[in-house]
Amino acid sequence: MSDRPKRATIRDVAVQAGVSFQTVSLVLNHPEKVAEKTLAHIRAVIDALHFVPSMAARSMRQIRTKTLACISFGARATYDNRSFQIQDTYWNNVLQMLGRASDAQGYALLQRHQNDQDANALAEVRQLFQAGRIDGVIAIVETVANPVLLELQREHFPLVVFGTRDPALPYVAQTNAVASAQVVDHLHAQGCRRIAFISGERDGRANEDVNERLHGYRTAMQQHGLPVDPAWALAGDWSLASGHRIAQQLCGSSAGPDALIFASDRMALGALKGLHDIGRRVPSEVRVVGFDNMQYDDFSVPPLTSVHSPVYDMATMAVQILVDRIEGRTDDLLPQHMFATSLVLRESSAVGTRPAPAGAPPSPLPGPE
Amino acid sequence: MSDRPKRATIRDVAVQAGVSFQTVSLVLNHPEKVAEKTLAHIRAVIDALHFVPSMAARSMRQIRTKTLACISFGARATYDNRSFQIQDTYWNNVLQMLGRASDAQGYALLQRHQNDQDANALAEVRQLFQAGRIDGVIAIVETVANPVLLELQREHFPLVVFGTRDPALPYVAQTNAVASAQVVDHLHAQGCRRIAFISGERDGRANEDVNERLHGYRTAMQQHGLPVDPAWALAGDWSLASGHRIAQQLCGSSAGPDALIFASDRMALGALKGLHDIGRRVPSEVRVVGFDNMQYDDFSVPPLTSVHSPVYDMATMAVQILVDRIEGRTDDLLPQHMFATSLVLRESSAVGTRPAPAGAPPSPLPGPE
């Protein structure tokens, strides 16, 4: 994909750009201190000469720390540590899968959080690398065009983004828009016409994944000629409690949606309980679908239809991409891999509904009126 | 707690023991290759001289890698990666909490699995340390007296065991036996007399935590003069599916237990669904209690009574113990901290049962017949 740069030195760049060695060094280590025009000029020279800073060059030598870092960028999750309760989050599982995949390649995985508002973030990641503590980075981000990652990528630093499709960076990601469209198609076929999509936000911000899911939903609704009530455009905070609350808010009357798609299973599972608590029947009155396909989905009442996330395959590929770069088995500086999701049908969307247990009223299968 | 050893060298040990320098080195690095009698003799000299091997001595110098390792010892969890579904496990959460606590102290956390059947396990952990990749170890074990950890402790290696009370090692742990007794007392007060405890095993092995929970249950049952039917002594494999299966197996007839205590919430949540599927009512016919106090417990049908695990406090303390050792703020070689659990009462044990939604039969509150 690119010529592996081998010869240009930082002095070559300085000579070619007509600046001092120190200025090039500043561009490499503290770009925020360099005037924009100078920065652009020197970076153009760096690109033209295929110059690789020593940090990245080091990774092409035989010194391996045999450690990968999984760095999550973004604000800290906001829950209160003191009242911490065990919770099942998608990211806990991603971390576990990345750990296993690293282990299988003989690498340890180091976890780290990096506040992306922090001006030192870039320096801190570099320091991990320069101190010989890591060979490469698996990044978890909330937005595309993370400036720290863009700079590391410029420097040919071994990195891969997990879960977010950033056109400028190497990534492994899943097909979120297609997944949403599949869910809408399925619910439409079940007779649903008033389908709401409940998004997720952390500190008021949706991530790219969720925006893609929302986009796929809107497009599919339009293709089916189904209206989207602006009052349905709600976002939870990924918690069970927010799903519980929003489901009750939307489905308190029979004029509400006849199907709820949640951007995560956690919110959808909270919604099942919320609907149960106000006596709204799932799936006969409201159908519910989530994202992630958590193990628990088979054991909720009723079991939850959900979009399966290929976490294992994605984690395996993310580690493979990094290790191949680190160990010099590929020159591809921009590997980008999409993974297909699949829709796992269960009773919450009226598929495979089992006979109700003795004593409970029968659960009717036809679509909502 | 002990004199910090400062002067003895490996040569002092060799002279005192009347062996060669190489033999002492072998004892330190490959004890499995040394005859038992020689090993005991040289170790006695090491203890008498308060000799600290260079690996541990290194940690008392100013060279810090600012990295802790969380190493889980034991056989690999057996689930199939390819069909991996997002799951909420206690250990995922422990890892997350340890990561946060490390982060708060300016340390990164490296995760690693170590097969404790592996003869190289000791050498591999030492290598992490000697290569300057870690400053200390937080160990997760399934059994006490893990030989690798005992040897590291002998060498004054900075380590702490998370979750298991091993008398010979530093640890943070929770009061499991007391917790079980509280659950039995509570269920007894609710009128239950046929109380079963369902243990958990991985690859046919229960861990120390679970053994303590089981012991606490048996003692409390005896104190209340309640019989324990040998047919109830079952163990799940920690999965939701095993809880589902065992609940149906035990409660298929009215002669079964009137209360089920599960060694984990995951199994208990599976049990709630299992009982739902055969039309057994919780809590009126069978009460159910779990361990861990997962967030989901508030959202199951009915909400699940559970033993709260103080994961945050335990993780914070584990990291504090290590960092204090690494940074030379304590001489305590055997810090051991117990944390109290608490019983969180919810509807599955007939506490705070809300009126049933319209259409469902009323949920009677009195104890089982």
Image: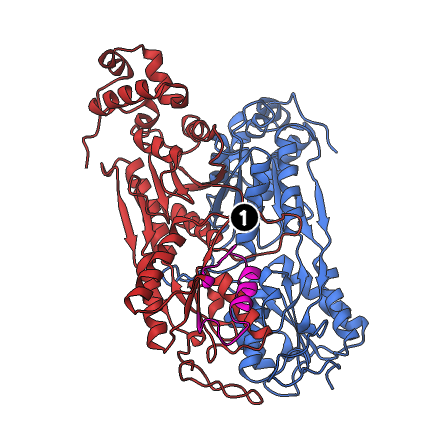
Chain colours: A blue, B red
Question: How many marks overall?
Answer: 1
Amino acid bearing label 1: Leu
Counting from the top left corner in percent of width and height, residue B227 is at: 36, 67
Q: Quadrant of residue A250?
A: bottom right
Query: In the visual, does A206 lie left or right of B49?
Result: right
Which chain is mark 1 on? A
Residue B341 can be seen, yes or no: no
Q: Quadrant of residue B40?
A: top left
Query: Is residue B208 placed above or below B358 in the rendered structure?
Result: above
Counting from the top left corner in percent of width and height, residue B94 is at: 43, 51
Residue at the image position 22 percent from the left and 14 percent from the top: B16
Counting from the top left corner in percent of width and height, residue B138 is at: 39, 41
Query: Is residue A2 placed above or below B281 in the rendered structure?
Result: above
Query: In the visual, does A314 lie left or right of B32?
Result: right
Mark 1: few, some, or many residues within 10 Å (few <14, many ≥20)? many
SS type, badge 1 = helix
Q: Quadrant of the C terminus of chain B?
A: bottom left
Residue A47 can be seen, yes or no: yes
Residue at the image position 68 percent from the left and 36 percent from the top: A333
Instruction: Judge by depth and name the residue closer to the eye, B239 or A29.
Output: B239
Instruction: Judge by depth and name the residue closer to the eye, B30 or A116.
Output: B30
Residue holding disc 1: A95
Query: In the visual, does B367 lie left or right of A153?
Result: left
Query: Is residue B15 placed above or below A7 in the rendered structure?
Result: above
Instruction: Judge by depth and name the residue closer to the eye, A52 or A180.
Output: A180
Query: In the visual, does B19 lie left or right of B240?
Result: left
Counting from the top left corner in percent of width and height, residue A13 is at: 61, 26
Residue B242 painted magenta:
yes
Q: Quadrant of the N terminus of chain B?
A: top left
Residue A256 painted magenta:
no
Residue stretch rendered in magenta on the structure: B231-259
